[in-house]
Amino acid sequence: MTVVYKRPVSRIAFWSRRLSVFAIGLIVVVGLVHRYQMIETVNFMAVLALAGCLGALAFLFSILGLRALWRDGAVGGGAAFAGLLLSWLAMAPLGFGLWQIIRLPAVSEVSTMAPDEVDWLVPPRQSDVVPIMPAVVAFVQQNGTAALALPLRLSNDDAVPTQTVLSTRRYEGALDRINRAVEFVAEKQGFTIVAVEGLLPARQDLEDRTLNEAPGNRDPGAIGLPDVGPIPQPRPYGLAELETVAASPRTVIQAIGWATLFAFPHDVLFLLREDEASTFVDMRVRSRLGGHDLGLEAAMIGRFLTGLDAELLGTAG
């Protein structure tokens, strides 16, 4: 008599793979939607938290599926192993956020300059702030490992100095030249400029000077010159080639920047100060998440200053 052993089927192993695939697909789809600003940041954070919880549940199911394979020889070992690997990918965004909250101090603004040195040209938008973020940060940090809280930066609303790897940049060059380089790198890295203070369009500036110096506007008695003079002739170069002319030794540019992976919005302020033949460049970045910046602001400043160093290679001091 032939005996056929019928292996049991571990349905929970297959569910672990299904949940993992669903969670990863949810992260990818909603991440793309958020990158194109079709969903609010608050809702996107909620979806990331949901996907992380689904990944944790899939991880538990995969462990139970592997246990059934080991003890009973149940069918579903491959599905359980796939669910185990995919669940880590599903939990990665949530796990990274929790790790950054434990590891880094709770700051929402990072700057290379003094906090009160310059103010925002346009008030930062507050609608993207996650309401429960401060409470989540406080709970995680209280229950996390206190020894992992590593101060890495100089920040913030409380003006508390911490160890920093970010510093002001000094470049050899006029303010208008450095300003063009800052705007070029900002556009290249996806920043959107919303306000500028301290620069005037070159054509408007030169036309104002020409108008003020026109023969009809001069006082002949004051300067001892005749009222009628030579007719001005066009210069051999076009005014359109001159992009901007510095109207003051200091320029402030406000922009909106987005994190590299999930496009979390940040308010960015650039401060350019001219000192004789050099120009100093500072940055200020404020997160719209509220409560914690997850280390994204320091990375954004470092990435921008590295790009600016490459653009102005040989002029950095």
Image (cartoon, helix red, strand yellow):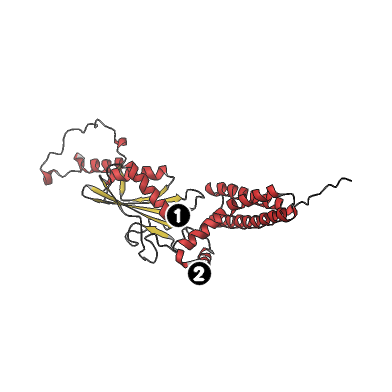
Horizontal relation, residue 82 to residue 309: left or right: right
Left or right: 241 in relation to 124: left
The image shows residue 192 at horizontal and vertical percentages of 43, 47
Q: Secondary structure at mark 2?
A: helix
The tally of labels here is: 2
Residue 233: x and y in percent read: 22, 31
Q: How would you rate the neighbour count of disc 2 (Cα within 10 Å): few for under 14, some for 14-19, many for 20 or more?
A: few
The x and y percentages for residue 310 are 34, 42
Badge 2 is on which residue? 142
- Is 168 or 75 nearer to us in this picture? 75
Residue type at mark 2: give it: Gln
Asked whether, in this view, residue 178 is left or right of residue 217, the answer is right
* Residue at image mark 1: 296
Type of residue at label 1? Leu
Q: Is residue 282 visible?
A: yes
- Residue found 15% across the figure and 45% down from its top: 219
- Camera-side residue of 279 and 64: 64
- On screen, residue 227 versus residue 305, left or right, reads left
Q: Is residue 129 visible?
A: no
* Residue 132 versus residue 24 in the image, above or below: below
User: In this rendering, which labeled residue sits more in front, label 2 or label 1?
Assistant: 2
Residue drawn at the location 42% of the way across and 44% of the way down = 189
Q: Residue furthest bottom?
A: 142
Q: Residue furthest top?
A: 236
